[in-house]
Image: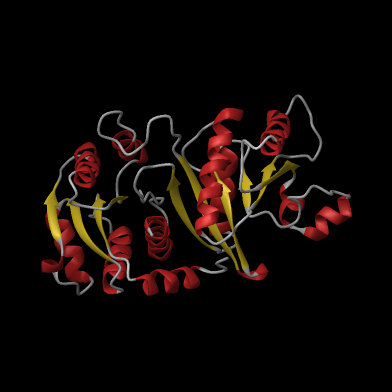
Amino acid sequence: MFRTFDEIEHHILSSGVKKRIALTGAHDSYSLEAVVHAKRRGLVTAALLGRVDEIASLLRSMDEPQDGYELIGCETEEENARRAVAMVHEGKADMPMKGLLQTSAYMHAVLDKNMGLLPQGGLLSQSTLVEWTKEGRMFQITDCAINIAPDVQQKKKIVENAVRFAHRLGCECPKVAVVSAVEVVNPKIPSTVEAVALKQACRNGELPGCIVGGPLGLDNAVSLQAARHKGVTDPAAGSADILVMPELCAGNIFTKSITFFAGLRSAGVLLGTITPVIATSRTDTPENKYHGILMSLLNAL
């Protein structure tokens, strides 16, 4: 299993993969810097959609030749998103990437019933892959950006998406911790009840290729010492590979806190689509956006 983003980058570089990105709202220095870096590494080519004059100016400021890119003028956020998704359907790009535009406009194009990128019956979900340097390993947090208050059936699909991605990362049987505030079932705390249902679904063979545990507090989901101290013997306790959040707010706050307070390297990835879709946060650093590109390239292998 990969332990760092550097290991993932080495693997992708060794594979010889090269894909074409359609960067929406490319008049964004952070997103454009990430794409330029990926291009210089020989991993991508790119079409840059948005305000052409601003994009050209940014390329000049990065000492990057403009003739290495296709610049496409798009005025509105909706036009940016629709055009990028259309380019994937037309075979003119392999994956869209979100630049400087609202998530809602981007998601509207990705989820369009006729021209979107979600298979029938599928569920789009988001996962944040975190590099935990202290422990020398990586783990996922899901869902931090898409599903606001998923029910049990939706959480099953969120787990399925995250497990498939964990397999891509080389984790053959990931430990899935359904996180809550407590380790015992409390009918007043829905996430504890959902944890039991998800564990049972795993036992019934509905969630293959993983071990599901919970409810688990965050501490005993990631710390063996904390789990032992509390007497928690859940099979997913102490070293979870996937943390399933109670709802979006918890996931969003948690993933941003480990970035801004702890400074851990991370990358957001969208899961469940028919082709890789890059959708990093507007406040992500160029490095984290580059990691997002790497995650989508890994999914494309």
Front position in the image: 275 or 147: 275
For residue 263, side relative to residue 28 (left or right): right
In the displayed structure, 17 sits above or below 270; it is: below
Residue at the spot 72% in from the left edge and 44% down from the top edge? 213
In the displayed structure, 133 sits above or below 73; it is: below
Q: How many marks?
A: 0
In the displayed structure, 62 sits above or below 172; it is: below
Residue at the spot 17% in from the left edge and 70% down from the top edge? 60
For residue 239, side relative to residue 126 (left or right): right
- Where residue 201 appears, as percent x and y from the top left, is 67, 34
In the orientation shown, which residue stands out farthest toward the top? 187
Question: Image quadrant for the N terminus?
Answer: bottom right
- Where residue 51 appears, as percent x and y from the top left, is 16, 51
Residue at the spot 22% in from the left edge and 52% down from the top edge? 93
Q: Identify the image's colour scheme: rainbow, by chain, secondary structure or one colour.
A: secondary structure
- Where residue 188 appears, as percent x and y from the top left, is 75, 25
Question: Image quadrant for the C terminus?
Answer: bottom left
Residue at the spot 75% in from the left edge and 52% down from the top edge? 219
In the orientation shown, which residue stands out farthest toward the front? 205
The quadrant holding residue 117 is: top left
